[in-house]
Image (tube, coloured by chain):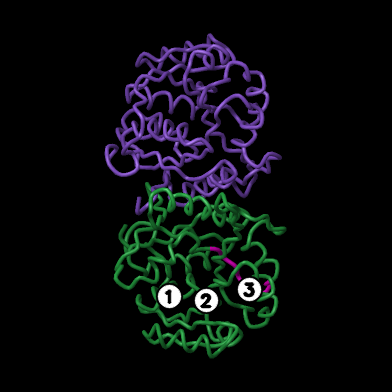
Chain colours: A green, B purple
Amino acid sequence: MNATAGPARNLPDVSQLVVGVLGGTGDQGRGLALRLAKAGQRVVIGSRSAERAETCAAELGLGIRGADNAACAAGSDVVIVAVPWDGHAETLTALRAELAGKIVVDCVNPLGFDKQGAYPLQVPEGSAAQQAAALLPDSTVTAAFHHLSAVLLQDESVERIDTDVMVLGEDRAATEVVQALASRIPGMRGIFAGRLRNAHQVESLVANLISVNRRYKAHAGLRITDV
Amino acid sequence: MNATAGPARNLPDVSQLVVGVLGGTGDQGRGLALRLAKAGQRVVIGSRSAERAETCAAELGLGIRGADNAACAAGSDVVIVAVPWDGHAETLTALRAELAGKIVVDCVNPLGFDKQGAYPLQVPEGSAAQQAAALLPDSTVTAAFHHLSAVLLQDESVERIDTDVMVLGEDRAATEVVQALASRIPGMRGIFAGRLRNAHQVESLVANLISVNRRYKAHAGLRITDV
């Protein structure tokens, strides 16, 4: 549970990397931007509208900057994709050039909702992360940050978020960068949890966490034990 | 983390129920039988061969009995399905009459393996649990006990297994019985985690835990935080 021990040992120093958050004005993106900036990371929020991104960044403070999605992607070393599933393919297709050579971190959960609650959507590529990998052949795509409560992320009175971050990907150097980023946030550890072909269930598990939250009035997270 | 507080509060008394374990001579079934019997539950191991089941039961001790699958099912109140995925549909189809009126707990993870590790198999019904529900219209089907390490379950030097058990199902009374059973095992809590349509990702997540175990030389489990 200590960021300098266990799975965080020997992870790279990521303190100088600029992290972009596409969809950074949404709840999840905004929460992630806030937590990473509080941990000392340089963060750029991206949005379709540069003005909305700049307003959001100014509200959050902590040196966070705002830009349109293209400038956000071009100006960052690591780019978190936190856009709604609806706009996922379209957004990434438009940013292929700006995202070339970058580490892309997909945290999108393709879910549907009906009166019985949430359920996973079928994605032709297998998962949002695999769709990103298919659309961005010149980027190194990883998947992470799926199971974080946007409520807790955005609540500045919460100092520590008691959860692990499952990090998936094919490229070990890239997954270790993402693990290191996650491990900078108090309470979190970035844990390698497999290849992208195993991303679907990680994304879909959010439907189960929504059921947990409803039953127990909680903001559930996941801790991996024995690691 | 205390079985008398939090999510275990107000769960039914299951101490008098007989629990059958189909496929109880396999690693997962054997480990579950052992843990439940140690917790004071009456347990019957089922196998295709009554003799093999009886031998396994005698080895485990703790009052565990052995029987062929049909007698195991007929003589139990709650029946855990821990058979290999390969024999899942066939076994359940043959036991439809014996399982009528019972709570069935599916813990089967349909996985394939290749040189890159484990990956989820596609199941026409959506998941092993949904297949069980389709094949057993007169039973109350739930899903649980997917993420437990068979190694830890069977290691008698391990007193406490630090993990939660996600319990899925449509019937609240049945899922609460299964939660109560899980919560009897030291270190475990049974947590309601959604309907059967959300079982696929819970079953498939075992592929990710296998990746975690390989990377960290661990026997990973999952704890749900904030519950």
Residue at position x 67%, y 82% in the image: A97
Whether the residues at callouts 3 and 1 have beta carbons within 8 Å, the answer is no
The quadrant in which residue A163 appears is bottom left
Which element carries disc 2, helix, strand or loop?
strand
Amino acid type of the residue that numbered disc 2 sits on in the rendered structure = Val
Q: Say left or right for A218 vs A97.
A: left
Whether the residues at callouts 1 and 2 have beta carbons within 8 Å, the answer is yes
Q: Nearer the viewer, residue A136 or B223?
A: B223
Q: Which residue is mark 2?
A: A78
Which residues make up the magenta segment?
Answer: A136-143
Relative to residue B12, is residue A16 depicted above or below? below
Residue at position x 52%, y 38% in the image: B169
Q: Which residue is mark 3?
A: A139
Q: Say left or right for B126 vs A67.
A: right
Query: Which circle's residue, 3 or 1, is located before the other in the chain?
Result: 1
Q: Are marks 1 and 2 on the same chain?
A: yes
Query: Mark 2 falls within which chain?
Result: A
Q: Which residue is mark 1?
A: A14
| 1 or 2: mark nearer the eye | 2
Res A43 label: none
Query: Disc 3 versus disc 1: distance between alpha carbons?
Result: 18 Å
Residue at position x 43%, y 70% in the image: A181
Amino acid type of the residue that numbered disc 3 sits on in the rendered structure = Ser
- The crowding category of the residue bearing disc 2, from other C-alpha atoms within 10 Å (few below 14, some 14 to 19, many at least 20), is many
Relative to residue A56, is residue A109 depicted above or below? above
Query: Which circle's residue, 1 or 2, is located before the other in the chain?
Result: 1
The quadrant in which residue A98 appears is bottom right
Query: Disc 3 versus disc 2: distance between alpha carbons?
Result: 10 Å
Instruction: Tell me if residue A43 is in the magenta stretch.
Output: no
